Amino acid sequence: MLTRALFWDREEEIWDEMPICQVCQTYLTPEGIEPGAWYMHPGEWDNR
């Protein structure tokens, strides 16, 4: 199971989440990602 992708936002000095990109959505499934993870729209997962 993949966890949510967090990165440090230097401008706001906070941890922020990187959404699952459209390319990754073609070979990953939402069931294999930590619940609640963000994903980019539009993408493959919009059709689920």
Image (cartoon, grey):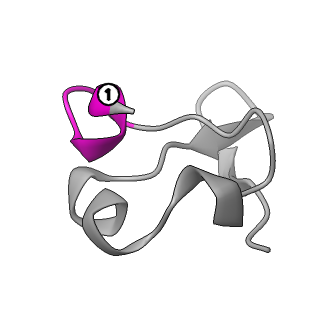
Residue positioned 79% across, 74% down in the render: 1
Q: Position of residue 44 (x, y in %)?
A: 24, 44
Q: Residues within 10 Å of mark 1 (few under 14, many from 20)?
A: few
* Element marked by disc 1: helix
Residue 35 position within the rendered picture, expressed as x and y whole percent measured from the top left: 80, 41
Instruction: Identify the residue at image location x=32%, y=27%.
Output: 46
Looking at the picture, does residue 19 appear above or below residue 21?
Answer: above
- Residue 2 among magenta residues: no
Answer with left or right where residue 24 lies relative to residue 23.
Answer: right
- 45 or 2: nearer the eye? 45
Residue 39 placement, left or right of 30: left
Identity of the residue drawn at 34% across and 67% down? 24
Q: How many marks?
A: 1
Q: Is residue 34 above or below residue 11?
A: below
Amino acid carrying label 1: it is: Asp
Residue 14, percent from left and from top: 79, 33
Q: Which residues are magenta?
A: 40-47
Instruction: Name the side, left or right, on which 15 lies relative to 29.
Output: right
Q: What residue does disc 1 label?
A: 46
Q: Above or below — where is 38 with respect to 31?
A: above
Furthest residue to the front? 48
Task: Pinpoint residue 8: horizontal percent, then vertical percent.
Answer: 71, 50
Q: Quadrant of the C terminus?
A: top left
